[in-house]
Image: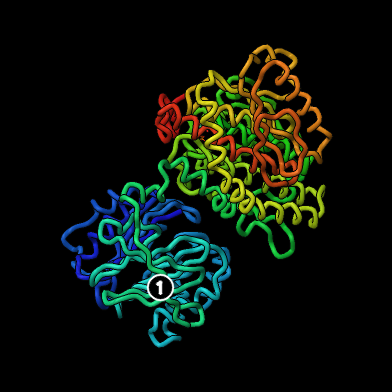
């Protein structure tokens, strides 16, 4: 995710641009930059780091002009450096572009543009668009809007783009595909932004844009067309949010917003990961086929929620790639003498990339000769920098301390790794891999379906608000889901919660069951090992001792003995964690609300635990 803003009107453009970027910094803060519409040649200033770094770079050379574009970045392609910061410009420095999203085919575009003599300065996918637009604008006799329409037809991926040219600096052109862009209508001034938070202080009149719609704004007005140049009537609406609510997209908490961002986060993490000939594309793990075939063991190291993603990795990688996988809590791993050698791949999972326990663990692993692959959501953070390779998730900034969308994208990342290893080692056919990949592509829509039933679940949760503790039962790949549900409840509702493997209940934990004890059971898919029957027995066992049972079950799976059933869409058992986790996130969120807790910043916790 990145924050983008455009302005054209009577104000000194730097003011609404910087104010807009400040309100969008939650969307990304790896770097910030602006392009101001100085006639003849644009004024560009950009800096790595937070917006304040950019503001501190301003001096008397900052021109007072009346149009421009601004960007605050969440890095995907290329680390958070000055050079990779947006805006990106063409070779003449007269056309600037800012971008939110992923241009899937940027490499091919870049090669073609380089062959035409364009020189590149950054590692980003966005810079290709600046050079492409520059050529197309010339082909369209200086018409930036026509150039944008032509460019979009050549781009693949999800993106929002804004562009400005020094020859007509009061004109700003934007377009969106699977990524947000909204227009703000002012008096003699107009705005564009990733969301209304950027301009809500100036106007509450907004226009939503549809897929592949190209919008051109000037101080006098706006023009929206489709890719064929046909005018589209603006769909204007009144913004009803406060400025603060707008930063949370109208949600009351960042956590709820991030729960609802999960479909897009999963989709973005999957984008472009299967080639035309059914090969999983994971070049960034930087392992040759020989090295992958030589692997004897995989060690997954992580903490907290990331550790639960690691447990799911074990099921997926052993099932598909037939490589033994051990999963280790980072803080425990580094105090034992692991059996590690060059045939061991260590996978370190970390949202922040700064968790000290995990960082110290990978240093320990590297000293023992292991290759380390990081799965991380924060570009160029410490853990990826100290690893041999990194697979970035595309969840965007996760502001709430309780991890939600980062967890789901970590699980998607381990699925992709498992399929890639299986394919390279020849233990799975390309057709099987492709079929599983296409099933994963359906997961965002299935998450959406679950989120459509979130209100009844929130009401149900409130009926358990006075409970002293909640137990979570899972079997097979549902066991890590039970642990994750318990962790969410602990960290948000400050209540005792514990996850168990269903089969372990009779070996002790069943003594915890008392009259009224809430038990949440994740029912295994009825397609696997008849494990659902064993879980249904567990449900009977706890119910017989007075438990109040909530069951999370796939649609059409038979359930007996539950007080409440939460239905989730059907999917292969291996993918069930992606779907079964979502109701547990909502359960914990609502319980925190019931208890009056600080949802986004729970007590005693930090988003990134940089101490051991
Ligand atoms: C999860 O909700 C917690 N915030 C916590 O367990 C977290 O997953 C853990 O601290 C690991 O953080 P990391 O992914 O940034 O390394």
- The mark total stands at 1
Residue at left 69%, top 50%?
288
Q: Residue 10: x, y in percent?
A: 20, 70
432 or 231, which is in the foreground?
A: 231
526 above or below 162?
above
Does dot 1 land on a helix, a strand or a loop?
loop
Point out the residue furthest to the left here: 60
Image-based side of 270 in relation to 254, left or right = right
Q: Residue 459: x, y in percent?
A: 53, 36
431 above or below 226?
above
Q: Residue 126: x, y in percent?
A: 46, 64
Residue at left 67%, top 41%?
567
220 above or below 531?
below
73 or 555, which is in the foreground?
A: 555
Circle 1 residue: 234
59 or 259, which is in the foreground?
A: 259
């Amino acid at each position: 995710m990145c924050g983008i803003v455009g302005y054209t009107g009577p104000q000194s453009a730097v003011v609404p641009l910087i104010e807009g970027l400040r309100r969008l910094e939650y969307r990304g803060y790896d770097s910030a930059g602006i392009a101001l519409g100085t006639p003849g040649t644009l004024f560009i200033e950009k800096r790595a780091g937070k917006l304040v770094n950019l503001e501190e770079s301003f001096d008397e050379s900052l021109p007072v002009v009346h149009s421009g574009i601004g960007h605050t970045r969440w890095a995907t392609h290329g680390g958070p450096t000055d050079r990779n910061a947006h805006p990106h410009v063409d070779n003449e420095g007269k056309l600037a572009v800012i971008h939110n999203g992923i241009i899937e085919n940027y490499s091919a575009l870049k090669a073609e543009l380089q062959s035409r003599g364009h020189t590149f300065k950054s590692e980003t996918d966005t810079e290709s668009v600046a050079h492409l637009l520059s050529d197309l604008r010339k082909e369209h006799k200086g018409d930036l809007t026509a150039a944008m329409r032509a460019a979009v037809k050549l781009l693949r991926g999800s993106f929002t783009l804004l562009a400005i040219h020094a020859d007509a600096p009061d004109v700003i052109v934007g377009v969106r595909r699977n990524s947000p862009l909204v227009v703000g209508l002012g008096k003699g001034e107009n705005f564009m932004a990733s969301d209304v938070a950027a301009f809500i202080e100036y106007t509450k009149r907004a226009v939503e844009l549809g897929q592949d719609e190209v919008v051109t704004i000037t101080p006098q007005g706006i023009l929206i067309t489709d890719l064929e140049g046909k005018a589209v009537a603006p769909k204007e609406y009144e913004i009803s949010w406060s400025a603060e609510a707008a930063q949370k997209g109208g949600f009351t908490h960042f956590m709820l917003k991030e729960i609802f961002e999960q479909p897009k986060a999963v989709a973005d993490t999957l984008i472009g990961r299967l080639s035309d000939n059914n090969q999983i594309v994971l070049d960034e793990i930087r392992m040759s086929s020989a090295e992958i075939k030589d692997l004897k063991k995989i060690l997954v190291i992580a903490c907290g929620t990331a550790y639960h993603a690691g447990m799911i990795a074990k099921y997926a990688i052993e099932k598909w790639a037939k490589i033994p996988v051990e999963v280790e809590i980072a803080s425990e791993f580094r105090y034992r003498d692991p059996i590690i050698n060059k045939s061991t791949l260590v996978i370190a999972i970390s949202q922040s990339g700064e968790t000290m326990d995990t960082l110290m663990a990978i240093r320990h692993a590297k000293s023992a000769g292991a290759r380390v692959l990081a799965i991380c959501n924060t570009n160029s953070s410490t853990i990826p920098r100290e690893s041999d390779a990194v697979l970035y998730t595309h969840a965007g900034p996760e502001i709430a301390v309780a991890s939600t969308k980062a967890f789901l994208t970590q699980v998607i990342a381990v699925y992709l790794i498992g399929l890639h290893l299986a394919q390279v080692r020849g233990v799975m056919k390309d057709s099987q891999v492709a079929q599983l990949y296409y099933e994963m592509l359906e997961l965002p829509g299935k998450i959406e379906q679950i989120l459509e039933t979130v209100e009844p679940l929130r009401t149900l949760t409130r009926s358990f608000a006075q409970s002293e503790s909640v137990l979570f039962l899972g079997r097979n790949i549902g066991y890590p889901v039970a642990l994750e549900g318990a962790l969410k409840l602990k960290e948000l509702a400050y209540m005792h919660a514990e996850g168990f493997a269903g089969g372990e209940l009779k070996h002790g934990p069943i003594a915890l069951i008392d009259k009224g004890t809430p038990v949440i059971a994740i029912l295994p898919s009825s397609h696997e090992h008849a494990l659902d029957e064993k879980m249904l027995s567990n449900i009977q066992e706890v119910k017989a001792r007075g438990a109040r049972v909530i069951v999370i079950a796939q649609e059409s799976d038979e359930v007996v003995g539950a007080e409440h059933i939460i239905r989730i869409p059907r999917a292969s058992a291996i993918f069930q964690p992606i779907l079964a986790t979502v109701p547990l996130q909502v359960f914990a969120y609502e319980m925190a609300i019931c208890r009056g807790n600080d949802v986004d910043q729970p007590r005693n916790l930090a988003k990134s635990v940089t101490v051991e």
